[in-house]
Image (cartoon, grey):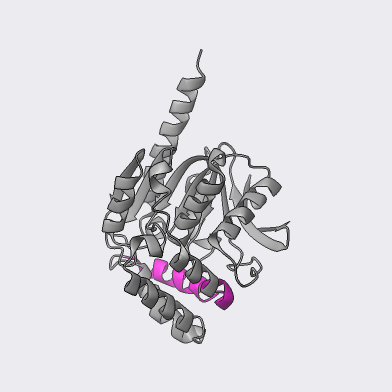
Amino acid sequence: MVTMELVQTHVERHSIAYRCAGQGPALVLLHGFTLDSRIWKPQLEGLSDRSKVVAWDAPGAGASSDPPDPFTMAEWAHTLAGFLDVIGIDQAHILGMSWGGVLAQEFYRLYPARALSLILADTYAGWKGSLPADVCRERLATCIRGASLPIDDFVPQWVPGLIGAAASEDVRADLSNIVADIHPLGFRLMARALADTDTRDLLPRIDVPTLLLWGDADRRSPVAIAEQLRDAIRRSELVVISNAGHVPNMEQPAVFNAQVRRFLDRQTFAATSRSAP
């Protein structure tokens, strides 16, 4: 089944929008801030032949409702768990990009039995865990200021930092359209959650296979941060994607999808081998 159009459901006080494609082991896609489920179109189309691919709009993004203020990363993780309950998914491979990668880590912290594996793309151990304190403060201040800008000013300031020089005009246009629909409150709350989160204590305790996918030209989360995560997560591997910035799933979708497919196929083979008599 392919549902590229948005489906709406409710989790406690939240109205949650999501897209779903395919059947099989669940692959749950978590977008970054200023973005929503539309960034995952190449994955919904390209990975749904053997997986049930689900991409939500997190509370505070896309067609989902805004959360209350304040709202923490742990609260987003609990909401994600409730969302998966509502749509009938007990366990899943969790793929998170940027802010969504930090959410994936927090979800694992709170619900480790529900994550079959982690795929972390161009993310952080939280800003607090990966950036110097002064950089973290300046990023947060920039986001707070940006949330008050007119969209016509915000989009041209924000989008260039998300992509590498090789990004196509189509990718630039698609990202611009998505970023133009930001929720100012959701953006501020997500930025605050990133600035407050430090997962360094968690990383050595992650005990599921973990794939780190990174754009080589990522300026927001450079490859040095990927190496930090690789060195801390014992069952991890790092793949760097050439000619891609902070959103390699859009900039280099064929390469990104091939790496995700390879990783998931390996998990399926391992699970089959363990269950064989």
Left or right of residue 78, residue 268 in this image:
left
The residue nearer to you, when weighing 160 against 22, is 160
User: Which residue is located at x 26 percent, y 57 percent?
Assistant: 224
| 50 shown above or below 254 | above
Outermost top residue: 277
Q: Which residues are magenta?
A: 167-187
Quadrant of residue 143 within the rendered picture: bottom left
| 272 shown above or below 61 | above
The residue nearer to you, when weighing 207 against 66, is 207
Is residue 5 at least partly visible in the picture?
no
Outermost front residue: 201
Residue 68, horizontal then vertical, whole percent:
65, 70
| 269 shown above or below 66 | above
Residue 221, horizontal then vertical, whole percent:
33, 63
User: Which residue is located at x 50 percent, y 16 percent?
Assistant: 276
Is 33 one of the magenta-colored residues? no
